[in-house]
Amino acid sequence: MLIDIAVGDSITVTNDEGAQICEVVVADASGSIDAGVVGHRPNSDAAGLKALLTGQDGSLQRLRKALEIRRIDLAAAGGLRLFDPTTPPKTNVELTVRPRLRQLRLP
């Protein structure tokens, strides 16, 4: 699933059944993968998502094309792994897009 979000938008991911792993890859408007956009550091290489997209499942063709159009290259993906096998049912994680601050250099 690919979702376009902007600064201030939030997405809540719910682990309905519990014990399910979820991988999220966040990219900025230029297509650069950056978990910092939602205030996190990558904690996985998004191997599950990469495996799905390199497989032969035709139902993922639209997602592959959408990633290509947005110039999102998963080869260098640093993903967010949400949840683990011990996660209880109905656990939520909220991801909010943060504004990027520019670093000022003083003379």
Image (cartoon, rainbow, N blue to C red):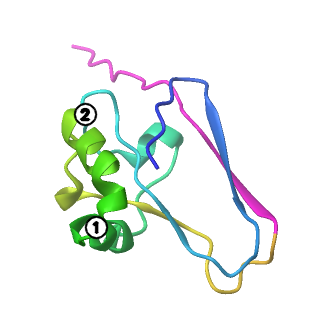
Q: Amino acid at mark 2?
A: Arg
Left or right: residue 4 versus residue 34 is right
70 relative to 12, above or below: above
17 relative to 32, above or below: below
As rendered, which of 41 and 75 lies closer to the eye? 75
- The numbered mark at residue 70 is 2
At horizontal 70% and vertical 86% (from top left) the residue drawn is 86
At horizontal 24% and vertical 72% (from top left) the residue drawn is 55
Point out residue 46 in the picture as x, y percentages from the top left corner. 35, 67
As rendered, which of 105 and 67 lies closer to the eye? 67
Point out residue 40 in the picture as x, y percentages from the top left corner. 50, 51
- The numbered mark at residue 100 is none
Query: Badges 1 and 2: C-beta atoms under 8 Å apart?
Result: no
Q: Residue furthest front?
A: 58
Left or right: residue 88 versus residue 24 is right
Is residue 102 found inside the magenta-colored segment of the image?
yes
Query: Residue 50 occupies which quadrant of the picture?
Result: bottom left
Point out residue 24 in the picture as x, y percentages from the top left corner. 47, 56
Write down the residue under mark 1.
50
At horizontal 26% and vertical 50% (from top left) the residue drawn is 64
Precedes in sequence: disc 1 or disc 2: 1
Q: Amino acid at mark 1?
A: Lys
| Mark 1 surroundings within 10 Å by alpha-carbon count, few (fewer than 14), some (14 through 19), many (20 or more) | few
Magenta segment range?
90-107
Is residue 31 found inside the magenta-colored segment of the image?
no
Query: Mostly what secondary structure, the magenta segment?
Result: loop
Is disc 1 placed on a helix, strand or loop? Answer: helix
